[in-house]
């Protein structure tokens, strides 16, 4: 064996891409690659791309352009595009940017070792299939390193909801749930390697309905209760959820399962029933607010997070005010908000678009309101005692940083707080991006 080759992966987009990037690194580990943090000394550069918003493909092409010098200096350097832009653009990427050696979609990256070998022969390697074999099972065989205290675990992929603005059902395909036994195996393996907190991932994670070891279809709540029994696993989270799949057993689990953290990301997108209908969301503002009430009845301190789109086609001032009213009614601890971005091939792309300046102004107002709520909820942590899972040293000497039960960043200066440990922490101060505390 020669010297290890170096792999640089740049990840865009959601946590599912973060998870996929880790799996790609593992897959290429068997081809002799180790990860590096810089493209400059890499033998392979992989862009794991996202297609959810604005000019995603254009951004990938301009990013690729930046590697031209590297490729000219080292013709052996392999350049690959993975993820949802790879899925959507396919061979077009190699036509427009001939220095790209590999294009691999989100469902076929377990074939990267074969693709890398092909590229090594000077051939182009393209795979945007939706193969029948389970990529996660193929990848399970690869060697694994010890790892930090938190991990993502994809349990469900794809989406059948077809919101009128969204490309996910096209790039990630139909909704598929992994068998529960495989998820549990992977979770146990993660815990053996040092993981204390697992975030279950899926484009529609609460629609999870994987076959259970007992032959029944398991809900996400059943999966969570089975994970709850794994010794050494201390915290469970999940994301992203759809309001329509917030089943009674999942709501109950938020009240009853101690390992399930009091944080829920539940996108609503809009507070206008007219717009929600045009978005094909099949819930109303009212039903969402009632749902939040039921979740809070089960777990009063739960921190609610959301996603919003402003400037969806045909959105009027009144529609936008309805969204602002919904935000006031819910009171968010966290939210992600976006200006509507036209995705070719989706139903909303054909409709009357909102003026860009109007959308900008709405986004600013919405974000100001969310920031206010977020701050108030974060500031209200001062004086409280919360659980914190410490992850790594902070910027100041002696400092350790971690996440609270509510997913706030917390730092303490205390030698008792070590990475991978959970301590009760009294919150003393609320800063711009984090909380300061002391081990209780
Ligand atoms: N334009 C703007 N935002 C979008 N999202 C999805 N598609 C679009 C789009 N075309 C947002 C939604 C979703 C989040 C992941 O991205 O709010 O919940
Ligand atoms: Fe996209 Fe809607 Fe599916 Fe979420 S539920 S992935 S927004 S289509």
Image (cartoon, rainbow, N blue to C red):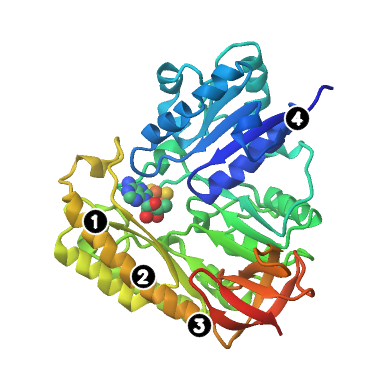
Residue 171: in sight, yes or no?
yes
Of callouts 2 and 3, which one flags the residue occurring earlier in the amino acid sequence? 3
Task: Give the vertical position of 412 relative to 136 (above or below).
Answer: below
Q: CA distance from mark 1 to mark 3?
A: 34 Å
The residue tagged 2 is: 370
Q: CA distance from mark 4 to mark 1?
A: 47 Å
Disc nearest the viewer among 2 and 3: 2
The residue tagged 4 is: 30
Q: CA distance from mark 2 to mark 3?
A: 20 Å
State left or right for residue 260 relative to residue 367. right
The residue tagged 3 is: 300
Q: Secondary structure at mark 1?
A: helix
Mark 2, other Cα within 10 Å: few <14 / some 14–19 / many ≥20:
many
Disc nearest the viewer among 4 and 3: 4
Indicate the quadrant where residue 397 lies. Answer: bottom right
The residue tagged 1 is: 360
Of callouts 4 and 3, which one flags the residue occurring earlier in the amino acid sequence? 4
Q: Secondary structure at mark 3?
A: loop
Residue 255 screen position, x and y as percent = 57, 78
The answer to whether marks 4 and 1 mark residues whose Cβ atoms lie closer than 8 Å is no
Of callouts 4 and 2, which one flags the residue occurring earlier in the amino acid sequence? 4
Of callouts 2 and 1, which one flags the residue occurring earlier in the amino acid sequence? 1
Q: Between 125 and 348, which is closer to the camera in this rendering?
A: 125
Q: CA distance from mark 2 to mark 1?
A: 15 Å
Task: Give the vertical position of 207 relative to 271 (above or below).
Answer: above
């Amino acid at each position: 064996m020669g010297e290890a080759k170096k792999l640089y992966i740049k990840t865009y987009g959601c946590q599912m891409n973060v998870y996929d990037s880790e799996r790609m690194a593992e897959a290429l580990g068997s081809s002799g690659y180790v990860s590096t943090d810089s493209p400059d000394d890499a033998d392979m550069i992989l862009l794991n791309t996202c297609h959810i918003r604005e000019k995603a493909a254009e951004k990938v092409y301009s990013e690729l352009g930046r590697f031209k010098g590297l490729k000219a200096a080292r013709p052996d350097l392999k350049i690959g595009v993975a993820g949802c832009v790879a899925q959507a653009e396919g061979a077009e990427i190699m036509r427009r940017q001939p220095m790209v050696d590999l294009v691999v979609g989100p469902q076929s990256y377990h074939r990267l070792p074969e693709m890398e070998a092909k590229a090594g022969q000077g051939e182009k390697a393209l795979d945007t299939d939706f193969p029948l074999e389970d990529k996660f099972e193929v990848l399970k065989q690869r060697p694994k390193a010890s790892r930090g205290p938190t991990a993502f675990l994809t349990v469900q992929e794809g989406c059948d909801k077809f919101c009128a603005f969204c490309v996910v059902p096209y790039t990630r395909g139909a909704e598929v749930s992994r068998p529960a036994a495989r998820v549990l195996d992977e979770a146990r393996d993660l815990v053996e390697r040092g993981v204390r907190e697992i975030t279950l991932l899926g484009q529609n994670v609460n629609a999870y309905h994987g076959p259970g070891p007992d032959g029944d279809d398991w809900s996400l709540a059943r999966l969570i209760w089975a994970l709850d029994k794994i010794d050494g696993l201390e915290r469970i989270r999940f994301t992203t959820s759809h309001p329509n799949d917030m089943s009674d057993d999942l709501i109950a689990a938020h009240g009853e399962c101690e390992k399930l953290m009091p944080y829920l990301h539940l996108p609503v997108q809009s507070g206008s029933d007219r717009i929600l209908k045009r978005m094909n969301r099949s819930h109303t503002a009212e039903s969402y607010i009632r749902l939040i009430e039921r979740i809070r009845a089960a777990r009063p301190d739960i921190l609610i997070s959301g996603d919003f789109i402003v400037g969806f086609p045909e959105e009027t001032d009144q529609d936008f005010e309805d969204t602002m009213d919904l935000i006031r009614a819910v009171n968010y601890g966290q939210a992600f908000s976006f200006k509507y971005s036209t995705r070719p091939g989706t139903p909303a792309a054909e409709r009357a678009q909102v003026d860009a300046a109007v959308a900008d102004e709405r986004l600013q107002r919405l974000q100001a309101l969310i920031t206010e709520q977020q701050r108030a909820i974060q500031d209200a942590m001062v004086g409280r005692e919360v659980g914190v899972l410490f992850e790594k040293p902070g910027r100041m000497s002696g400092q350790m940083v971690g996440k609270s039960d509510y997913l706030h960043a917390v730092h303490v200066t205390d030698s008792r707080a070590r990475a991978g440990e959970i301590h009760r922490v009294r919150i003393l101060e609320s800063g711009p991006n984090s909380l300061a505390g002391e081990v209780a």
